Amino acid sequence: MKAPRTARRPGPLTRVTRDARPFLRARTGTALRLGGWSLLEFVQTFLGGYGVARALDHGFLAGRPLTGLLWLAVAAVAVLPAQLATRGVFGRLADLVEPLRDGLVRRAVSRALVGALEHPTGTTARSLSQVTHQSEIARDGWAGLVLTLRSFVFTVAGAVAGLLALEPRLLLLVLPPLVLGAGLFLATLVPMAARQRDYLTADEAYAAHAGRTAADLRDIAAAGAAARTVTESGELADAQVRAARSLARWSGVRVVALAVCGRFPPLLLLLGAPWLLRDGLTPGALVGALTYLTQALAPAVQALMTMLSTVGGRLLVVLDRFTDAPPPPAEDGDDGRAHGHGQGHSRGLDGHDRGAPTPRHAPVAELDTVTFAYGPAARPVLDRLSLTVAPGEHLAVVGPSGSGKSTLAAVLAGVETPGAGSVRWLGRPVRAADATSVRVLLPQHAYVFTGSLRDNLRYLCPDATDRELAATVDALGLDPLLTRLGSLDAPVEPDRLSQGERQLVALGRAHLAAPPLIVLDEATSRLDPAAETRAEEAFAALPSALVVVAHRLSSAHRADRILVMDGPHTRCGTSAELLRTSALYRDLAGLWEPDQPLRDDGGSNDPLRDDGGPNGSPGDDGGSNDPLRDDGASNGVLGNDDGSNGFLRDDGRSNGPAGPVRENGRSNGSSNAASRGGGVKSTPPPSPV
């Protein structure tokens, strides 16, 4: 039984021609206009040889010099319209050349982005070479080929028409060497294209190796792999040299073809001149034929072959390397892997579906027994964590420093891949290709680039209207910044913005995009409480799900649910539920476990107020024991300066009259709030005051 034949892959010329047809078909009008301007070159070529022949036969040799001069003048004047047509030719040429380069760059960028999303660890410098080097080769080569081919077609047509008008028998001497040289030249096309392809492959391999080496210099030095790296570099350089030499040898064969086409026809015409003159050929016709050969045919053929030999093969190979650009991602099937990289549909940042519909009532984000650790032997930061974020839900994440809040945000946003468990967006496994359409992750350090405020805000949503921009500016309180800059189109210099202004710009960018999931990882840490409240309320008004890594408990109080993290230990619920069930949350809130309900009038139960205010009355000097103060002087847990009585000092110790801090970062049960009036379960230590 014969083995089934495998389908043969089309050759490079077939592949390039297949992709070139729609490109050229769409520009038929441009090509026709280019040909219209080139007709003047046909007229110039025809009159060049014909005028010389008539000037001799009917002018100078016939004793009529005035007639001869008139014919020479006709041949000379024919040059002027051809020169005037140059402007029109180059104008139409731009309409053919620039769209080609733009299309190739788009293909290369598309391939690079899709490849990076499908194989994040396997990116190469191939696309960089295509965008910066190969696309320019294609652009210049295509422009030169169009100009040369256009000139060749109309010049040869003019010369052949002139030879037929002078004496048809002249073609018997002129055509054979032209056909022989052209055949020899065509025979070198395939091997030359192969050698050119080998050279470009070697060039890309060396560029990719150089890029990897530059990125891994530290690892190479640490592993002692310098000698091996140098050897690999030498081998790749030698391969490139061998490819270049093979290409040069085939170029030598083309030189022979050029000589046959360009030098043999005039030589054969001179050798056959006696026979032609005896057979009735006029001297003027002979000189006119030589004029066609030396001034028109030979230069046109030589220019075409030189162009094809030096640029044509390289252009074919370069264009062929762009023909395998991948199609846009298609929808995942049900068998997609978590964090898989199959083809899938995408959703716009406006949340509108661009492909197959998402499962109805599916959570925006879902963690299923997720475990994550920074290293195989490291202690898990997340340990079998399951979490569901519903559409439109507002979830706050709180916990001591180092408890895994930012790690959770990264895993939830698809930036980090869990070691075990699965992450799903909108009911489907997380895919890198869906990242920008499903979620926005804003870190503490906001990214603002040099450009206009409009460009910064529309970075994730380029099609946003002025009305949408105005709504975002109003919702987030960007009016002071807009007033200071002058307009949305005013330039933004990131170094001249405060940290809070940078965060507001980044928040505006996310608010304008409004994807299904918005994750704020301390993205409001540089805002004052009023601005932070306004920003979170603006995001809460969106239909998007909002996850906030909170640095102030006021953020947690605004959330629908609160996730308390203490390393791998987590607890989730409302603020009231967590006050009853989570000792860590009570510590974070600066509260003891009370025997009586907490006061709701905002007055302090603390008898050890530093401002001398009465028990239960708010102090007037800003020395309140409110755990949500933002000046860091709070007796609560979230003060940020070294003078805080709070729980979360940068050194992990409490300044309050609390007992020793446990290794997990939580208080041993004592705090500045420990002497609140009535019925505490633990006896507070003596006050140091």
Image: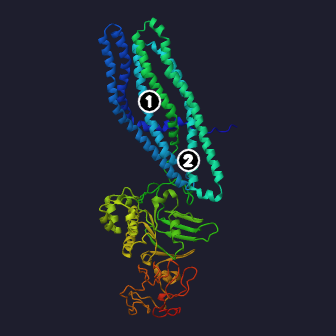
What residue is rendered at 59% in x and 58% in y? 218
Q: Is residue 585 above or below residue 82?
A: below
Q: In the rendered image, which residue does mark 2 sit on?
A: 207
Sequence-wise first label, 2 or 1? 1
Viewer-proximal residue, 279 or 341? Answer: 279
Percent x, y for residue 609?
Answer: 42, 90
Q: Is residue 329 visible?
A: no
What secondary structure is found at the residue carrying circle 1?
Answer: helix
Q: Is residue 299 above or below residue 165?
A: below
Q: Position of residue 23 (x, y in %)?
A: 43, 38
Label 2 sits on a secondary structure element that is helix
**Residue occupying the far right of the picture:** 1
Label 1, residues with CA under 10 Å away: few <14, some 14-19, many ≥20: some
Spatial CA distance of label 2 from label 1 is: 33 Å
| Residue placed under numbered mark 1 in the picture | 149
512 or 94: nearer the eye?
94
Residue 583 image position (x, y, % from top left): 53, 83
Query: Which residue does the image show at 45% across and 47% down from the upper left?
Result: 106
**Of the residues shown, which amino acid type is indicated by label 2?**
Ala
